[in-house]
Image: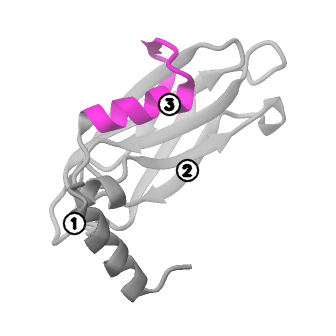
Amino acid sequence: MLNRRQILMLCGAWAAAGFPVTDLIGSAHAGPRDAKKRLAELTGGVKSQKGRISITLPKVTDQGRFVPIRISVDSPMNENDYVKAIHIVAERNPSPEIASFHLSPANGKAQVSTRIRLLKTQVVVVAAEMNDGSVYLGKGRSKITGGAGGCG
């Protein structure tokens, strides 16, 4: 593991070589394009369809650090039709990927609940990968009214 001094030396050498330091440590501000790109990586670039996903997210919250989210996907969760994975990305967080959940018919329901961090008001995108290779997308928006949000 690098200590603080080694990280500063590495960043200095990187910048002296003419490379932007953000290439080394990542962008401080992701956007919808970054989220879309990350979802494509997670789902293997499969063209997505709308529907089957229900997202419960507060429309307004003052706590960007603890935003509750509940996702359910319409699926019988049997051997012939089940959700393999649920991916969550946030369009305006510094790192768009929030979480991935892997499921099987043994889960019984295609449903997950968790708390996520959101830097500021933004759209949260959910992708559900099905066992037949298809991908469904759903979106939800939450307005963060308090302070610096959860990722700053």
Q: Nearer the viewer, residue 64 or 45?
A: 45
Mark closest to the chain's N terminus, 1 or 3: 1
Which amino acid, mark 1? Ala
The answer for how far apart the CA atoms under marks 1 and 2 are is: 46 Å
Mark closest to the chain's N terminus, 1 or 2: 1
Which amino acid, mark 3? Glu
The residue carrying mark 2 is 113
* Residue that protrudes farthest toward the front in the picture: 17
Dot 3: element: helix
Q: How many marks can you see? A: 3
Residue 24 lies left or right of residue 126; in this view the side is left
* Image: magenta residue range: 33-54
Q: Residues within 10 Å of mark 1 (few under 14, many from 20)?
A: few
The residue carrying mark 1 is 16
At x 30% / y 70%, what residue is drawn? Answer: 13
Q: Residue 100: x and y, percent?
A: 58, 44
The residue carrying mark 3 is 41
